[in-house]
Amino acid sequence: MKKKKVIITVAIVAIAAIIAIIAWPKKSVPVEFEMTDVQPDTIRNSVTATGTIEPVTEVEVGTQVSGIISNIYVDYNSLVKKGQVIAELDKTTLNSELNSARANLASAKSELDYQTANYKRYKTLNEKGLVSRNDYEVAYLDYRKALETYNTTKESVKKAETNIGYATITSPIDGIVLSKEVEEGQTVAASFETPTLFTIAKDLTDMRVIADIDEADIGSVREGQNVTFTVDAYPNDTFHGQVTQVRQEATETDNVITYEVVISAPNNDLKLKPGLTANVSVSTLERTNVLSVKAKALRFTPTKEVLGKAYKIVDTDGKNKLWTREGNTLTAHKVNIGATDGIRTEILGGIKQGTQVVMSMTEIKAPEGPQEEETNPFMPRPKKKEKK
């Protein structure tokens, strides 16, 4: 009987100890609050990309006839005027073709003159009933054939004369020669496509950047937006331009979709050269002197588990909140937000300018060394050493 009472007593003591441990109040964790002000500032956002610098107007000069390059009058970086002769093809073969076409034209003219006179004679005789209808029609057909041959031969002469004109290569614009693809004595063939002889840029003081913008960013890019860019050739210089065109055609490279954006690039000092790679930053958002706060403050949320009973938390409904601190009381304020650049967020209402809000809190670690441990009245205490 006594043994049963002892067991019951031990069980009651154990249950009481467990309840005491669970209900035993925990100490509040000491924390330090990081504060920030709600104040006016500038919010900026940008899209970065790479692009290639090129002239606004660039013309590839070719030839429509085949032949040997007999003379070249320009070189790289040569300044040229519209209509200036920059190269010539050998005209020996072309002159021969022209002379042959003219001889055929003269023969066709003689045949036409004869058939015309013969047709008129048969027409008169036919009207008088002196020749048969068949003879008259044969004379008329011969005249028509001679006329068609003459016209065809006449066009051949015009074509030969035009080809001779094509043998003299002239500049189509005022500009500068960027590239020269041929040398004197080289044969060019224009059978299937026009071969390029020179590339001429109209004005190197007026350049542009063709930038490839990722599909995730293209939605925020608009004409007229300000752009800054740098080139490796001048790492300490920043160049400025504007978006002049957002092209609708998509380009896929390695499963990545990009869109071409054209950016103006004034080049009065001629530092920018065709083909340079530009590191572009398009300003897609710029709001100056707007009430804002650091975006980190909008992500702060105090918890009772961390602060314990030492602090009072006054919460409110709302998706976006800022927290103020007065002594040991943290109060939430519902705010309306606007644009953000990831660092600062615009505040449209809900809190006044100059208000200090909590941005974060960090636990203050206790100093190293022996510390007084929490005790539970139901836990056994160490035995004291007996004095000798």
Image: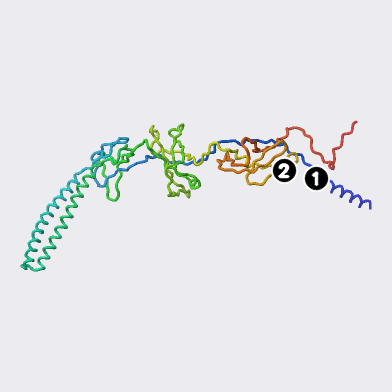
- Cα distance between the residues tagged 2 and 1: 16 Å
On the rendered structure, is 274 left or right of 337?
left
| Residue 64 higher or lower than 80, as above or below | below
The residue beneath circle 2 is: 304
On the rendered structure, is 62 left or right of 272?
left
Numbered mark located on residue 23 in the image: 1
| Category of crowding for the residue at label 1, using alpha-carbon neighbours closer than 10 angstroms: few (below 14), some (14–19), many (at least 20) | few
On the rendered structure, is 118 left or right of 169?
left
Residue type at mark 2: give it. Answer: Lys
| Residue found at x 40% / y 33% | 271
| Residue 281 higher or lower than 256, as above or below | above
Q: Is mark 2 on a helix, strand or loop?
A: helix
Q: Nearer the viewer, residue 12 or 5?
A: 12
Q: How many labels does the image show?
A: 2
Q: What element carries label 1?
A: helix
| Residue 139 higher or lower than 235, as above or below | below
Looking at the image, which residue sits at the far right? Answer: 1
**Residue 187, quarter of picture:** top left
| Residue found at x 89% / y 51% | 8
**Residue 334, quarter of picture:** top right
Q: Nearer the viewer, residue 103 or 383?
A: 103
Q: Nearer the viewer, residue 71 or 246?
A: 246
Provide residue 105's location: percent of width, then percent of height: 14, 52
Residue type at mark 1: give it. Answer: Ala
Question: What colour scheme has been applied to the protein in the rendered image?
Answer: rainbow
User: Are discs 2 and 1 less than 8 Å apart at CB?
Assistant: no
